[in-house]
Structures are given as structure tokens and as C-alpha cells.
Image (cartoon, rainbow, N blue to C red):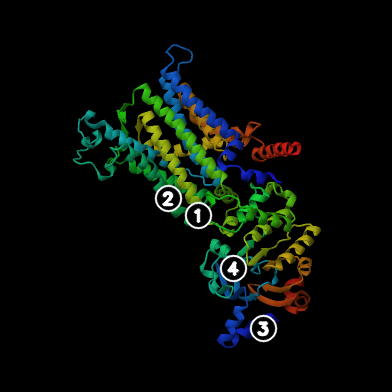
């Protein structure tokens, strides 16, 4: 449905394209990337509106992680445009620059700083000076402390603040990582398979957490778990072989015969 | 409410020094040694049980330089995961800077009696002092160069390596290549650094004869002071937010990048600081051993430094100091008693430590071991909480 909508706007005249772009927080258009002859992304186009919660699903090898890599500057696309807030070209920037623009990324495997406490993990992610000498002479401010306390409550880890991150459970690490993204005050959050390996109750909690976060930020979630995507209750984009196969509400795309064939039917 | 609040309210330097039990012990030992060892050498008459012979004073001074070198390696390896197998190069460059000053101090007392040119240049039939030897007749200039040259090399090398994201074993290999390239370069006579023989036959430092006990005692005290000072600087770095970023880089480099930090700048900073410390160690080492030659650039020596750190306990700073003393004492002992056995012992020691003491000797001491940082912190925190409860 929406893929067609994108096509239509693109096909119409220039000013209208601009106005369509003006409403997006993330605009991915015609992106292709090839690794050693393998087309990981093939003319991928989609966009995310400000404040939107979007789930991206697709079978293994559909290009979900490559898409994340392109948006966060880890991989450069061969062709295509990736725009943040309709004007900033992300294909020209590196990871640190993109992170500082306000795009936070959560990895598939929980990646936290294991030899630091939960508190220090959040402190390191806290938005603010990233310079070497700023860091050398940094002292914790009251505002930072308040912000960390607030995030600890959001991610349900208040009582773990002094625990080494290495000692957290798998699910708690995932939440901590989401908390670290929040500390960066991002405008767009990219979350890669947040519930992989989580217990059912943790999965539910995580869906709730992401829905709360999505009230303040734009969130893109890549996920396999259909129950979880249903819990998220948002618009879904289905990827297949590096391009968008279908887009819409979950029950809508689940009825799409092509989606059933490549993904759900198997 | 939490200890963190109290912790961060403390004056930072005093706060982290008080919490650092190993560091307090190290600094106390260094202060005691800086006072007692020279006294034992200069004031206690020979024959007394408390007399410190001059050879022992020099030997301990040499160990202190090695300890500083080990400290510099632990700062980058233990805290940022940069395994440099070429740190001997920075040490040797610092040593050569000091050696050049000492050569210029010889003046016309050399074998050939040339007032300007060192003996080896006269021998090579050189007529003029090369431009890069200018200024080394001044002590302050030599000291500045002993820090600046290793620092600059580390900065340029690090800039290229870290910007290209060379990490892990690849970085270790190119650091080996770097020190090996310098080894070959310094072997060449036309480099103007004395070739194979290096720089030696030093006479005096700032007008004090290097042969006198007083000068040797002075150098020993200087070594204690610089080791202590560098320890405090290194501890300060690792306790700051920058230090936390370094540990984060060690554990999850890409996470740090996606958090918005420029990993390469952080690595470059700590790598350069570490090289400067290694340079200082070299500059203190040369007047105490009386010679600097290209052998100090040997890749094997740089690997040995890493073994010192691993034996003592990586990532603790004071562990590196301890490791340097243990391994070098063993080296002095074995090369004296059974020289052929030394390398087997060193290899065996490295394997044994890796297998049985992954946290090094320090990790085996109950008070410091057993993931220690956490348990120490927890103990301290509990104590604080109890005190708070009573009050």
C-alpha cells in the first residue's frame, strides 16, 4: 500500500516531492548495495515520519541489518539517497557524526560495556561533549545525574545501578542498551531484534518499553518475532531480497499473498 | 542516597587515590625507597648489614625504569586493549635523546679529543655535527626531545593506524615492524647515532660525574619520582570519564563509535601519553646503565615488556610495576646462575601465567584478586552504607 504511495509522490512533480520529504525523519530512496556480487539491498525505498514507531520484518538475508548499517554510516550504499530530517545526507557521514546527529542504534547482540556499572554505562552514553579533553576533565553534573536516574526508571533497572553490566541477564542488557540510546537524546532510534533470546514476560515488557519510548522519539524496530510485532501495534514494512515487499498494518500485510509466500508461508 | 553521589562529591584526585589500595602501597614503597635506599648507600658505612652497595642501587634504578615502561604499556593494553609490541622503540628514542646529551657533555675528553664531534663521528671522518645533533648540548632540550620525539612518532603512527581502524593483532604486527625498522635504521653508521655500538663512554650529567655514588643516588631518586608521578597521571586518566571511554573501547569498540565518540582520537591520546612515558623511562635508563645501542629496539625486548605486564596483572597499573620487578629480578638471577636457561624460564613463565593466573600475580592476592575491582568497591560501599546507617 504505502510503497505505491511513495512511488506516487516520487512520480509527481518536484515541489511535491520536497513536501513529502519535509515530513520525514528518515528518507531512504533507491538504495542499492552489493557485496562481492551479492545484492544485499536492491533499490530499497521507504520513509519514516517523525514520532512514528515502525517495525521492519523479513526473512534471513532480506537486508535488514545492512539497511541499519547504511543508515548509521557503517556501510556506504552504491547508489541511492538516505536523508535524515529531510535534508541531512547520511551517506556522507561516519558513525560518530551520525550518532551525534541524533540517530541511536541498538545492536542485534546486546552490546553494553561489561566492565562498567549500569550507572557508568548510562553516563558514557549521556549526550554532551564527546571530545577527548572534555572527557578527561569531566565531572558529573546534577543535570546528568537526574537524567541518568530518570532513564534507570524507564528501563526498569533502578536497583541494578551499581551492578556490573556483565552480571545482568540477557534481557536486562537489552534494556540497558536501549537506555543508553535514550541517554543520547536521539531523534531516531534503530533497534535491531530487541527480543531475540528473551523470555515471554521480558518480551512483553520490552514491547511496552518501546511503545513508551515511541511517544517521544521515532523508533524503527527490526524483528523476527511476530507476536512481538503484534504487541508493538504499528505500521510494518516487509523486506525481501533487499527491497520492500509490502507495507501496512500487520494484519493487512499478513494477508498479502506475496508476503505469505516468501515469509509467513514457510 | 547512593554512594555514587558521595563518591562524585569528593575531590577527584584525593577520592580516587584513597580508593586505590594498590596505588597507595606502591606510592608508599616508592617514597620509602627514594629515601632509604640512597641513605643506605651514601650514609651507612660499608660492611654494615644495612649498607646498599652501588651495584644494587643501579640495578634497582634500572628496574624502576623498566617498571615505568611496563606502566606505559599497561595504560594502553590494560585499559584500551591496544597491544603494542613496539613500545621498546619509544623507550629507545627517549634513551637516545638522553644519550646524545651525554655524548655532547664528553666534550674534548673523548679518545680523539674533538671538542664538538663525538668519537664515532671523528672515526667516520665526519667534519661537522649533523643538524639533528644541534641543541643536544643543552640538558633541557634533551629532556624535551626525550618526550617529544617518542610522542611525535606515536602521534603520527597512531594517527595513521587508528584512523584506518587497524586493531588487534594487525596493530601489534605493525608496531613490531615499526620497532624493527628503527632497529635497522639505527644500526646504520650514516644515520649518525653511533651505529652498532650506539652511544657510550658517558662522563657526566649536569656536571656531576656518572661514576660517583651521589649521582647514581640522584638518578635513583629521580626514577622513583618519575615512576610515582607517571603512576598518578596514569591513574588519573583511567579514573576520568576518558578512562571509562577507554575501557569501553576495550570491551565494545563499535558500541562506543555508535554512541558518538571518536574512538581514534581517544586511542591516539592514550597511545601518545604512553609513548611519552616510555620516552621518560628511556631517558632515565641510559645514564644509569651507561650505554644506549640499537639493541633496545629489538622486537623481542618489546614483547618482553608485555610479558612483564601480563605477569604482574594487566589493567591495574601497579600490577605492571610489580611484574617488571619480578621478571627482571628473575632475569638478573637466571642470567647470572644459568644463562642458557633464562629464555626457557621466560617462555614457561608466560605460559604458566596465562594458564593459571590470567589476572597476573596481583590477581592471585586475595585483597586485590577475585574481580577485585567490583568486590573492593562493594566492600567499600557496604562500609559506607553501614556508617551511614549508624549515623
Q: Residue A71: which numbered mark, if any?
A: 4
Q: Chain of mark 3?
A: A
10 Å crowding of disc 3: few (<14), some (14-19), many (20+)? few
Image location (x, y in percent) of residue B14 = 57, 38
Let me know if marks 3 and 2 both belong to one chain.
Answer: no
Q: Which residue is mark 1?
A: B264
Image location (x, y in percent) of residue B218 = 40, 27
Q: Is residue B134 left or right of residue B9?
A: left
Whole-number angstrom distance, CA of label 3 to CA of label 2 = 53 Å
Mark earlier in primary sequence (3, 4) = 3
Q: Which residue is mark 2?
A: B155
Residue at the spot 64% in from the left edge and 47% down from the top edge: A116
Whole-number angstrom distance, CA of label 3 to CA of label 1 = 44 Å
Image location (x, y in percent) of residue B351 = 57, 35
Foreground pick, A78 / B369: B369
Let me know if marks 1 and 2 both belong to one chain.
Answer: yes
Q: Is residue B85 left or right of residue A243?
A: left
Residue that extends furthest to the top in the rendered view of this protein: B47
Whole-number angstrom distance, CA of label 1 to CA of label 2 = 11 Å
Q: Chain of mark 2?
A: B
Whether residue A221 is visible here, answered yes or no, is yes
Amino acid at each position: 500500500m504505502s510503497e505505491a504511495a511513495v512511488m506516487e509522490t516520487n512520480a509527481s512533480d518536484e515541489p511535491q516531492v520536497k513536501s513529502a520529504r519535509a515530513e520525514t525523519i528518515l528518507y531512504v530512496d533507491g538504495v542499492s548495495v552489493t557485496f562481492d556480487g551479492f545484492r544485499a539491498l536492491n533499490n530499497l525505498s521507504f520513509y519514516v515520519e517523525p514520532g512514528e514507531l515502525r517495525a521492519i520484518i523479513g526473512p534471513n538475508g532480506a537486508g535488514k541489518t545492512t539497511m541499519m548499517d547504511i543508515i548509521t554510516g557503517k556501510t556506504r550504499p552504491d547508489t541511492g539517497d538516505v536523508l535524515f530530517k529531510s535534508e541531512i545526507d547520511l551517506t556522507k557521514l561516519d558513525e560518530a557524526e551520525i550518532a551525534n546527529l541524533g540517530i541511536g542504534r541498538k545492536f542485534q547482540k546486546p552490546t553494553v560495556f561489561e566492565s562498567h556499572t549500569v550507572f557508568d554505562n548510562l553516563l558514557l552514553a549521556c549526550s554532551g561533549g564527546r571530545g577527548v579533553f572534555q572527557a578527561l576533565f569531566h565531572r558529573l553534573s546534577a543535570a546528568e545525574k537526574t537524567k541518568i536516574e530518570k532513564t534507570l526508571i524507564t528501563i526498569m533497572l533502578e536497583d541494578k545501578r551499581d551492578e556490573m553490566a556483565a552480571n545482568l541477564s540477557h534481557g536486562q542488557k537489552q534494556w540497558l542498551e536501549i537506555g543508553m540510546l535514550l541517554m543520547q537524546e536521539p531523534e531516531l532510534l534503530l533497534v535491531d531484534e530487541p527480543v531475540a533470546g528473551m523470555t515471554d514476560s521480558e518480551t512483553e515488557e520490552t514491547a511496552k518499553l518501546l511503545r513508551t519510548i515511541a511517544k517521544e522519539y521515532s523508533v524503527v524496530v527490526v524483528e523476527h518475532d511476530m507476536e512481538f510485532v503484534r504487541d508493538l501495534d504499528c505500521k510494518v514494512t516487509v523486506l525481501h531480497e533487499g527491497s520492500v515487499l509490502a507495507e501496512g498494518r500487520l494484519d493487512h500485510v499478513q494477508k498479502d499473498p506475496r508476503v505469505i509466500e516468501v515469509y509467513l508461508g514457510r | 542516597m547512593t554512594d555514587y553521589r558521595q563518591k562524585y562529591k569528593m575531590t577527584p584526585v584525593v577520592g580516587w587515590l584513597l580508593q586505590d589500595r594498590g596505588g597507595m602501597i606502591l606510592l608508599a614503597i616508592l617514597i620509602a625507597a627514594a629515601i632509604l635506599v640512597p641513605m643506605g648507600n651514601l650514609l651507612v658505612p660499608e660492611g654494615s648489614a644495612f649498607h646498599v652497595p652501588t651495584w644494587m642501587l643501579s640495578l634497582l634504578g634500572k628496574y624502576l625504569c623498566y617498571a615505568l615502561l611496563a606502566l606505559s604499556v599497561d595504560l594502553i593494553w590494560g585499559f584500551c586493549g591496544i597491544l603494542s609490541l613496539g613500545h621498546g622503540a619509544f623507550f629507545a628514542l627517549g634513551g637516545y635523546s638522553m644519550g646524545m646529551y651525554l655524548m655532547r657533555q664528553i666534550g674534548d675528553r673523548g679518545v680523539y679529543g674533538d671538542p664538538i664531534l663525538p668519537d664515532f663521528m671523528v672515526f667516520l671522518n665526519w667534519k661537522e655535527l649533523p643538524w639533528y645533533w644541534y641543541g643536544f648540548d643543552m640538558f633541557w632540550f634533551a629532556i624535551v626531545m626525550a618526550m617529544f620525539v617518542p610522542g611525535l612518532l606515536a602521534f603520527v603512527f597512531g594517527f595513521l593506524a587508528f584512523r584506518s581502524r587497524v586493531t588487534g593483532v594487525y596493530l601489534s604486527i605493525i608496531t613490531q615492524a615499526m620497532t624493527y625498522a628503527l632497529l635497522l635504521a639505527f644500526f646504520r653508521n650514516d644515520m649518525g647515532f653511533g651505529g652498532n655500538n650506539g652511544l657510550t663512554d658517558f662522563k657526566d650529567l649536569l656536571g656531576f660525574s656518572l661514576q660517583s655514588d651521589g649521582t647514581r643516588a640522584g638518578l635513583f631518586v629521580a626514577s622513583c619520582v618519575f615512576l610515582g608521578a607517571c603512576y598518578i597521571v596514569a591513574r588519573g586518566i583511567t579514573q576520568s570519564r576518558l578512562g571509562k571511554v577507554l575501557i569501553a573501547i576495550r570491551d565494545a569498540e563499535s558500541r562506543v563509535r555508535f554512541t558518538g565518540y571518536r574512538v581514534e582520537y581517544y586511542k591516539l591520546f592514550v597511545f601518545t601519553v604512553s609513548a611519552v612515558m616510555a620516552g621518560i623511562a628511556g631517558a632515565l635508563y641510559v645514564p644509569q646503565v651507561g650505554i644506549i645501542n640499537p639493541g633496545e629496539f629489538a622486537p623481542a625486548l618489546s614483547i618482553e615488556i608485555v610479558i612483564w605486564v601480563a605477569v604482574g596483572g594487566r589493567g591495574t597499573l601497579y600490577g605492571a610495576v610489580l611484574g617488571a620487578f619480578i621478571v627482571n629480578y628473575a632475569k638478573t638471577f637466571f642470567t647470572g646462575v644459568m644463562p642458557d636457561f633464562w629464555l626457557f624460564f621466560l617462555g614457561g613463565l608466560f605460559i604458566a601465567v596465562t594458564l593459571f593466573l590470567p589476572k597476573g600475580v596481583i590477581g592471585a592476592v586475595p585483597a586485590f584478586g577475585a574481580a577485585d575491582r567490583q568486590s573492593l568497591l562493594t566492600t567499600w560501599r557496604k562500609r559506607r552504607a553501614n556508617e551511614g546507617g549508624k549515623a
